[in-house]
Amino acid sequence: MNELLSPAAPEVDARGAAGVLPELPGRLTDPLRHELIAFRRDLHMHPELGNQEFRTTTAIKTRLERAGLRPRVLAMGTGLICDIHPEPGPGADQQAVDQQAAGKSAAVPQAAGPAHAAPPMLALRADIDALPIPDTKEVPYRSTVPGRAHACGHDVHTTVVLGTGLVLAELAKAGALPRPVRLLFQPAEEVLPGGAADAVDCGVLDGVGSILAVHCDPRVDAGRIGLRAGPITSACDRLEVVLSGAGGHTARPHLTTDLVTAAAKLATEVPALLARRADARSGLSLTWGRIESGHAPNVIPQRAELSGTLRCLNLPTWREAPDLVHEAVDEVATLHRAKCELTYVRGVPPVVNEPSATALLREAMAARSGAASVETTEQSLGGEDFSWYLEHVPGAMARLGVRPVGDRRSRDLHQGDFDADESAITTGVELFTAAALLHRS
């Protein structure tokens, strides 16, 4: 028995008289589980920022190659994809097997047509970059890189997709993989507008029919996932405003452009204007993170700067947001006779889970751990560049529970003490392997 596979391996589509799906193959064995935990801890100790994930990319590539797979590094130099194709067997889709055999043996391309059309692949995506914040945990696998940490769980996401690939490769050899699967390890999720857009330009979705992902959620218990059809994250853009004008003595503000007052008014009035010019149900929210102006108490400065983020719950309003912001900023700046320069950086649209892809994740999790292991989650105001893939193909993201069972302390992502219950790796791998086995379109 291969040490990567559990003993149970019934036919994928065999259902009982009551329509209950029996035990699916692809459970993690103890040796692989321990290996994956060690792999995750190694990534955690060596975090790399977006577009700098060279060590991470090499580690993933090396392990996939050791499993007999053929990963391909993306053109940008970090990140990679790896395709796993069905082999003949009772669980394989015969069309997928025939197409793969034709692709391996044909000296010339096959004629176009339905009989030779490759079945669309199911893509499983992981983001691989870390954050520029210090790791404040006291654990043996604490980050060894000053000012860098895997504080958003990308090391867990990466390990989950790697482990899924290793299990699916063995299932494929056993003839138990019904459809082809693409593993997608994406760089630079934390860098606006997100590495997903560059990955799409590199062709990572060529031949893909749908795409799935998980994201760590410290508010959900380990062993569970959170799901919702429709929007599950929000849009997130960044803006910088520079105000300029004639400065002068604070004794004579009427002879100057009072930029401190202008900046203060802009900081409070622009969010208020936006709240009245967009549908309240869209959740459009502008929050400033930095305001800077002046150096002396008796000098009106010649420059003021503001920067912040704009978040939005729905896609139509997000598409209108740049025009709304420009209009509101110009109005307030003009009122205070300030020259204004606005830099609006498009970030990411909302992740909108497609219903059938969401149902696949729900069915897969229920097959592994029962229907009660799936909870309904709320739409968050966080941004995620997984949304760029959904502009091209249907898909869904699940929230992967990483909170230790019984722990009710308040925890969040993007904090230096963030950590994950490592049993979530098993949950994620078995969720994805079940989804790959149940995927039929």
Image (cartoon, rainbow, N blue to C red):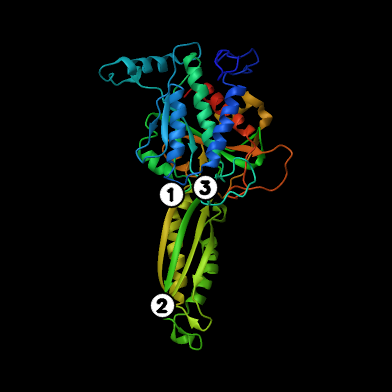
Residue 69: percent from left, percent from top: 42, 23
Q: Rate crowding at label 3 as few (under 14), some (14 to 19) or many (20 or more) other CA atoms within 10 Å.
A: some
Q: Amino acid at mark 1?
A: Pro
Residue 50 at x, y = what percent?
Answer: 45, 46
Per the image, label 3 sits on a secondary structure element best described as loop
Cα separation, mark 1 vs mark 2, equals: 32 Å
Q: Residue furthest right?
A: 406
What amino acid is labelled 2 in the image?
Gly
At label 2, counting other C-alpha atoms closer than 10 Å, the crowd grade (few under 14, some 14-19, many 20 or more) is some
Q: Residue at x 55, y 49 (%)?
A: 382
Looking at the image, tell me whether mark 1 or mark 2 is earlier in sequence order.
1
Q: Position of residue 104 (x, y in %)?
A: 33, 17
Residue 220 appears in the figure: yes
Image vertical order of residue 269 relative to residue 149, above or below: below
* Relative horizontal placement of residue 414, taking residue 341 as reference (left or right): right
Q: Amino acid at mark 3?
A: Val
* Residue at the (28%, 18%) spot, across then down: 110
Residue wearing tag 3: 145
Image vertical order of residue 141 relative to residue 193, above or below: above
Residue 209 horizontal/vertical position (percent): 43, 29
Front disc: 1 or 3: 3
Q: Does label 1 or label 3 sit earlier along the sequence?
A: 3
Q: Which mark is residue 245?
A: 2
Q: Residue furthest bottom?
A: 251
Find residue 51 and report its image quarter. Answer: top left
Tell me: 201 left or right of 19. left
Of mark 3 and mark 2, the one earlier in the sequence is: 3
Q: Which residue is mark 1?
A: 193
Residue at x 43% of width, y 75% of height:
338
Q: Residue 190 versus residue 33: which sits nearer the camera?
A: 33
